[in-house]
Amino acid sequence: MKNTDFKKIEKKWQKKWEEKKIFKVKKNSKKKKFYCLDMFPYPSGEGLHMGHAFVYTLGDIFARFKRLQGFNVLYPIGYDSLGLPAENAAIKIGMHPLKYTQKSIDNFMKQQKAMGWSYDWSRLIKTSDPSYYKWDQWIFLKMLEKGLAYRKKSAVNYCKKCDTVLANEQVVNGKCWRHEDTNVEIKHLEQWFFKVTDYADELLEKLEKLDWPDRAKKMQRNWIGRSEGTEIDFEIETPRNKISNVIIVHGSNQKEREKLKGGSPPQNERNWLPWIKKELEKKGIKCEIPLMPESWAPKYKDWKKELEKLKIDENSVLIGHSAGGAFLVRWLGETKKEIRKLILVSPGKAAGWHMSYIDDLYGNKTYENLQKFVDEEIILFTAKDDYKHHITNAYNYAKELPAKVLCFEKGFGHFVEKSMGTQEFPELLERIISRQKWPIFTTRPDTIFGVTFMVVSAQHPRLMELVIADQEKEVKDFLKKLKSVSEKELEKLEKEGIFTGSYAINPLNNEKVPVYAGNFVVADYGSGMVMAVPAHDQRDFEFAKKYGIKIRQVIKGGDVKKEAYTGNGVLINSERFNGLESNKAKWNITQYLEGEGLGRKTVNYKLRDWLISRQRYWGTPIPIVYCDKCGIVPVPEKDLPVKLPEKVNFGKGNPLETAKKWINVKCPKCGNKARRETDTMDTFVNSSWYYLRYTDPGNNKKIFSKSKVDYWGPIDQYIGGPEHITMHLIYVRFYTKFLRDIGLLKFDEPALSYFTQGIVSGEDGNKMSKSKGNVIEPLETIEKYGADTLRLALVSFGSSDSDSSWDEKIVIGGRKFLEKVYTYFSKLDEGKDTPLTQNKINKLSKEVQENIGAFKHNLAIIKLREFFNYISDKKISKKTAKSFLSVLSIYCPFISEELWSRLGDKTFVSTSNWPKFDESKINEVFEREEEIVNKAGSDINHIKQILGIDKPYTYIYTIPSETKLFKNSKQLLMKLSGSKVVGVYSSQEVKENYKLDPQEKAKKAKPGKPGIYISRTPLDI
Ligand SMILES: [Zn+2]
Ligand SMILES: [Zn+2]
């Protein structure tokens, strides 16, 4: 293209801006601040792509605009430089992540400068710098202190061959990204979490006040997923353990004879024994409590005889209280009878008592390895206010048998009614049946009578507890086939499951329903198990059809033979709740459950705590050491940062595991040998507070100075891709609230206003991709047309918030426009502005300003071009010329800067002032007049064509009030219509001299529309 050397101009101004540091800002309490921020890039080896070019241009336009408006604009940039791609590159091409990252950053920077983005480069941050991630670690310690960082087991993707955990994006169709033949397995590992859920309510509430796109708010609302509902306790029965009977042996009592004489009930009917018997029988479990002979002086052989009258088998549960417990230990040791469970409540023990009957009853032996006769467990109950020697007994037994001790707080004593204050003993009851209770969350308690199965998450860490022996193989095979999927994919997944062998008991009708392990239930939503109501939930319906599970309608409506009926309605098949309407039934059923202690009203969130552990190298080390003695020990603040060791091996396992020197440290607490945590943090941690660090990037004493953050924060305009609405924007809001709560911030929200840009597709309308061959590189475009043209084009394709396609014609058109602008302003023919010009420049400033506020840059560009077309053949004042360049500079800063200097200005247009528009100069009459004249011009053209006259003589007859306007516009009309001559007369004049209007066209004159006469020859006047 033409001769203007845009490349030279661009280089020149890049250099000048850098030399003069014109975009560097300082805190200035007298000036109003504006914080404009683009989401910082991940510096990939491939460099800047068109998506980057677009979004950062939008940010730059906004920053430049606010700067011209007189704000103290903070517009920083940095690099989100930790993360997986650098590590993958290390594995693939053998380049150390440190080197890879630095190379990528250098490359990025060059390109960013070429684009003319007006960053304050002095505030550059890189998250891979220890001076940055030191503060990630510091925040981690603060969270740990406040109980917001914690460890728990969680499912991870694991590749046997890599011997390490994979990120979701490293799993391709259920296989490892490096080992296409290797299935990714699911493992449960201890992981670190941040308790985002503590802020769920506030995250939801404060959302309403933000100036964010509605779509973004909606996505966050869904992500947080608050739902009100009911939590219902379901007992789970694992039937390999059908209890055949429970036998309870009471203790001995020296004063029993006197007690009986005094009218006391016999010993097998006292304390908690009758209550337990009643409760067990309610559950259909046989309970026997023999009255042992002569309990005031018991003899072992008599008690043995009495006990052996009862049927005892491998599914019997034996319980002994006090002396009864000691008796059972001896009996079991001697008979070697196999039983299911042994529970000793405050047991006695032979321990040098000098009472013959006790020695006889207990025997002198100890009974080691009794456990091998007990299928499930031996449990000992004791309490802090139990007799001292009984507490000792319990712990001695615990070692010898061995057994598990459950030590209760005070209030149990020796487990008799006198010390317990009640006959009820639910703790024992629960232990006997050891049915697990699972709280199940539902928003539809009204459908509880329609529950016909349950589904537990296949990734639940406690799943195997529910699986019976017969089902073990099948369940394990099922788990092997499971693909690890992301949250999004979960929805689309084919729902599959496998029976565990366990049953859940519906607390409302005591019905037993099968428990399945399913691939579509999330392990940490609620308790990880859901109740399934196939008649009223489509997902459950499909599952039930697939596995032949029964479907029971409990709400009237629909045709549940065909599909689930998910609406509300009147209850049926729901016993005492029949006839109630859904909403009323929800309430009544919840009330009923609450009254029975079987359920409660609750709020549940889809939002999960944030799993931050990554078993990878290129991330922030978690500042924790593990000590055999002290357990989990945080690294003291003074020892931060825990730096990543450089020497590690890539390829197998977590590379950090290979840094032996780094791993082995002294415990900060006790000085003994300890091990460093080798997990690093998710890189979303780094981006959750970077916007705060920009306010004070060099601070090496504190995370940031409070006064600086108070001045600059929060972000006034945040710009970034729609893909960050959920994770990043949830986390950055969570961090902000946490840092506020520990007194570091005064504000609640990180970004008051948020804009998401659309995607610029390839010229064929498809997403730019190498495989489609439609990728357009920003650098190549700059090379060909210049950066100003690229910037102009990117915002001209369409409205910035919606998707658009690359259009080379628009690019070329933009370049031509800039050429003309360059030519016009390089040799500006100065003159006085006409009122119309003044009207136009004021209007331009006003309208572009409105368009920028709404990110409607495409409309602003049209206004700019219209204005330029108008002035292109006119003289304008220097002031108007400069106003135009100021406006143009936010889009095309290089050429504007050059032309600004050619007008003789020694300052920078980038730091000039936005032309304040003067409403009084904007005169709608001018616009209206221009419109009328233009219309007349095109009317003449039209008639000209009909008559086939090329260069006519044209006569116009106007109403008297418009005569002056048209007389003044003769030149313009000639130009517009290609007429030789234009004559203008008022209809009044014509009446007096008919020769002026031979065809009586004046009669046609109306306001805004004159009569027109066109002729090959001039009028004979
Ligand atoms: Zn692998
Ligand atoms: Zn220690």
Image (cartoon, rainbow, N blue to C red):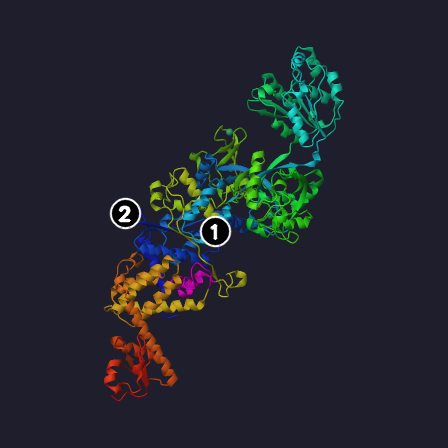
Q: Position of residue 273 (x, y in %)?
A: 65, 23
Pointer 2: residues within 10 angstroms few (<14), some, or many (20+)? few
In the rendered image, residue 562, in percent from the top left (x then y), is placed at: 65, 54
Q: Which mark is residue 218?
A: 1
State which quadrant residue 350 falls in.
top right
Depth check, front residue: 557 or 734: 557
* Residue 498 percent coordinates (x, y): 67, 45
Q: Amino acid at mark 1?
A: Lys
Q: Which of the pair 820/927 is nearer the observer?
A: 927
Q: Which badge, 1 or 2, comes first in the chain's sequence?
A: 2
Q: Which image quarter holds the N terminus?
A: bottom left
Residue type for callout 2: Lys
Segment colored magenta:
776-805
Question: To which residue does mark 2 refer?
Answer: 30
Point 29% across, 47% down: residue: 28
Secondary structure beneath dot 2 equals loop
Q: Is residue 373 above or below residue 942?
A: above
